[in-house]
Image (cartoon, rainbow, N blue to C red):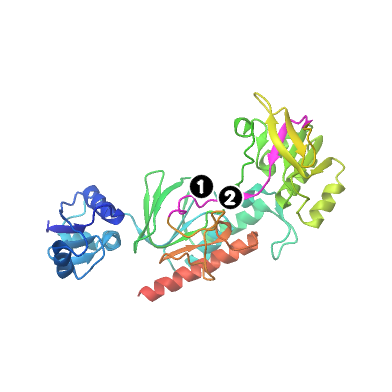
Amino acid sequence: MKKVAIYTLAGCPFCIRAKSFLTEKGIEYEETEVTPRSRQWEAMKKATGGGSLPQIVIDEKPIGGYGDLIHLEATGELYELLDKPLTEKPPPLYDVIIIGGGPAGLSAAVYAARKMMKTILISKNIGGQVTDTFDIENYLGFSEIETADLIGRFEEHVVKYGVKKLVGPEVVSLDLTGKIKKVFVDDGKICLGRTIILAMGKRPRPLNVPGEKELVGKGVAYCSTCDAPLFADMDTAVVGGGNSALEAALDLANVARKVYLISITPLTGDPILVDKLKSSGKVEVFTEYSTNRIIGQQVVEGIEIQGLDEKKTRRLDVQGVFIEIGLLPNSDLVVDTLNVNKTGEILVDCECRTGISGVFAAGDVTDVPFKQVIIAAGEGAKAALSAYNFLMKQI
């Protein structure tokens, strides 16, 4: 095998990654640690023509830094340069990796496939957070359609184009900075992509009051579509004042004996939902009330609320509490790498670009306003087309 040399700087994260990669692949190397403007630094610049770190040389031929190393490994060129036979088949290299199986991710998959891009979609499930609602009344072409039916049609469209899917496993880490993006999955798989589309959506925001965490699954729930049938002929409470809270209260009104809707603000949901709520006959509304705690030992037994202008608290005896106070973006994996706003949403431009070359984002995980299925689907399509244009410029 040919000689490998690497120039590094103490504390450089990409130098550490490059050395770990070489060690993991069983590639021996000689390391020269340099400091800026030192004699070794000047020697490195003369040998490699580069001033960034790390700099890697194979048999006196400069190959670049960590990103270049990953790219060469993904294409198989690294082993040709080393005259080293492949001991194992490298992971396939995709044109685009899509993370997320909601409307944004599924739409991106269709548009990527239509552009003949080698595509893989990775998601814990198909449908994303929209599956927490029963039906959709504002998707173009359908006056009303059940969510399961709409997502089923989305998935059929994806299957039609033969997109590879990895559904179930969870992405545990990402390496977005090199020419080749790396996605590490909790089942041990590593996926390599020339571009990546982040479409992870959002998750329910917790109330963060005493009793909530302890009673999750024991009467505390976040999805009325999933769990409302469990509370037939029971007294229940919904916390929140937006559309999701109003929809949850209406779901529960179909099965529960009584529904209390508790909001710290006046109701902010669509007027049509407010009207339906008022005509249900089962829902009692408490606006400008805070939730102090959820009561119960083994199961939910009640909820304690307090008017914003009152000193005394009030207990409502309920067996179920549904928390519908908004959503948090599933951006935990990238908040230290990409630019995000104060709520953690990924900042994107009009072409879904994130600021890192080859990395795009779409749907509710981004700062694009108006979180709607149709908008997420459109943003997913836009992200795929942007990824395609990016790849065309690399040729």
Horizontally, is 77 left or right of 361 in the view? left
| Residue 124 tag number | 1
Span colored in magenta: 315-336
Contact check, label 2 and label 1, Cβ < 8 Å: no
| Residue 290 tag number | none
Question: Disc 2 and disc 1: Cα gap in Å?
Answer: 17 Å
Q: Quadrant of the C terminus?
A: bottom left
| Residue 328 tag number | 2
Front-most of 105 and 65?
65
Q: Earlier in the sequence, mark 2 or mark 1?
A: 1
Residue 72: in magenta span: no
Q: Indicate the quadrant where residue 287 lies.
A: top right
**Rendering coords of residue 108 (x, y %):** 52, 63
Horizontally, is 103 left or right of 162 in the view? right
**Rendering coords of residue 171 (x, y %):** 44, 48
Front-most of 272 and 44?
44
Is residue 381 at all visible to an observer of this figure? yes
Residue neighbourhood size for the residue with mark 2, other residues' Cα within 10 Å, grouped as few (<14), some (14–19), many (≥20):
some
Residue 329: in magenta span: yes
Q: Quadrant of the N terminus?
A: bottom left
- The residue shown at (57%, 55%) is 102
- Kindly identify the amino acid type of the residue bearing the numbered disc 1: Lys
- The residue shown at (69%, 42%) is 224
* Element carrying mark 1: loop
